[in-house]
Amino acid sequence: MQTIDKAKANGLARFTSLVYLYTGLGIALWLVVANAIARNAGLSKAIFSLAGAHSIIFTILVVAVAFGFISLCNYFATRSYFMTFVSYVAFLVALSVIGVPIFYLYSAASITQALVVTSAVFIVAAAFGFITKKDLTTWSRTLMIGLISIIVVSLINILIFKSSMMMLLINIAVVVIFLFYIAFDSQNIKRIYAQAEGSESLGAIALVASINLVLDFINVFMSLLSIFGDSN
């Protein structure tokens, strides 16, 4: 019994390490691609022109394309690691368009500081979620309601009020909500491993498991940058 438990613990540790490795690499790739696009004047101008003329439609389109690739990741996870990886990279490339403006709006020092702070709070929240004995699935409904509320309020503010103070409060709420999501998704790694244990597709499943953590990190990072970043 002890040997079996130890084998399971070792398997979970390897799987968890792989998920966080993919998370770190995914965040790095997102930043690199966003920066590369920002350095391309022609491409940046086209993105800003489209976003400026149809900001909501543009954002919805980018998010829809990114989530389309997430669906492909889920589809290929138990079928092909290569196709899961290709879909994962495509998802990050599509989502990187949202990160392009930060390289124009904020100084390099602000971006670096936001990355450091986000990394620190991410580690703390992830460690809490993974270690705690409390079942965080009870948070699921509350977190979803909070996220939907933030999206609705953001749209109202963009379309009607255009208030910088409300935008500040929204960013603070985003940081809080996604810190909870980091803990939730970190604990969820255990449930994913329990369901996939023994599968030959653990590598691809770990890749898919990292997607939510990448999204959590990006949301916290961009909100912290918006709150504390110095204009470039």
Image: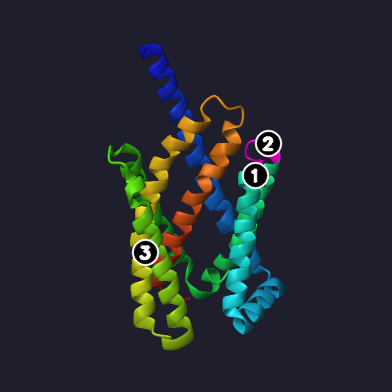
CA distance separating discs 2 and 1:
8 Å
Q: Is residue 76 magenta?
A: yes
Q: Which labelled disc corresponds to residue 146?
A: 3
Q: Quadrant of residue 99?
A: bottom right
Please tell me whether mark 1 sits on a helix, a strand or a loop: helix
Asked if the residue at tag 3 contacts the one at tag 1, i.e. Cβ–Cβ closer than 8 Å, the answer is: no
Asked if the residue at tag 2 contacts the one at tag 3, i.e. Cβ–Cβ closer than 8 Å, the answer is: no
Q: Position of residue 137 (x, y in %)?
A: 36, 46
Disc 2 marks which amino acid? Arg
Q: Position of residue 136 (x, y in %)?
A: 33, 45
The front one of 104 and 97 is: 97
CA distance separating discs 1 and 3:
28 Å
Q: Is residue 105 magenta?
A: no
Which badge, 3 or 2, comes first in the chain's sequence?
2
The residue drawn where x is 65% and y is 81% is 49
Which of the colour schemes (rainbow, by chain, secondary structure, one colour) is used? rainbow
In this picture, is 110 found above or below 73? below
Which badge, 1 or 3, comes first in the chain's sequence?
1
Disc 1 marks which amino acid? Tyr
Q: How many labels were placed on the picture?
A: 3
Which residues fall within the magenta stretch?
75-82
Asked if the residue at tag 1 contacts the one at tag 2, i.e. Cβ–Cβ closer than 8 Å, the answer is: yes
- Horizontal relation, residue 86 to residue 203: left or right: right
Please tell me whether mark 2 sits on a helix, a strand or a loop: loop
Determine which residue is flagged by label 1: 75
Determine which residue is flagged by label 2: 79
Q: Which labelled disc corresponds to residue 15?
A: none
Can residue 156 be seen in the rendering of this structure?
yes
Please tell me whether mark 3 sits on a helix, a strand or a loop: helix
The residue drawn where x is 45% and y is 70% is 151
Q: Local crowd at mark 3 within 10 Å, few (<14), some, or many (≥20)?
A: some
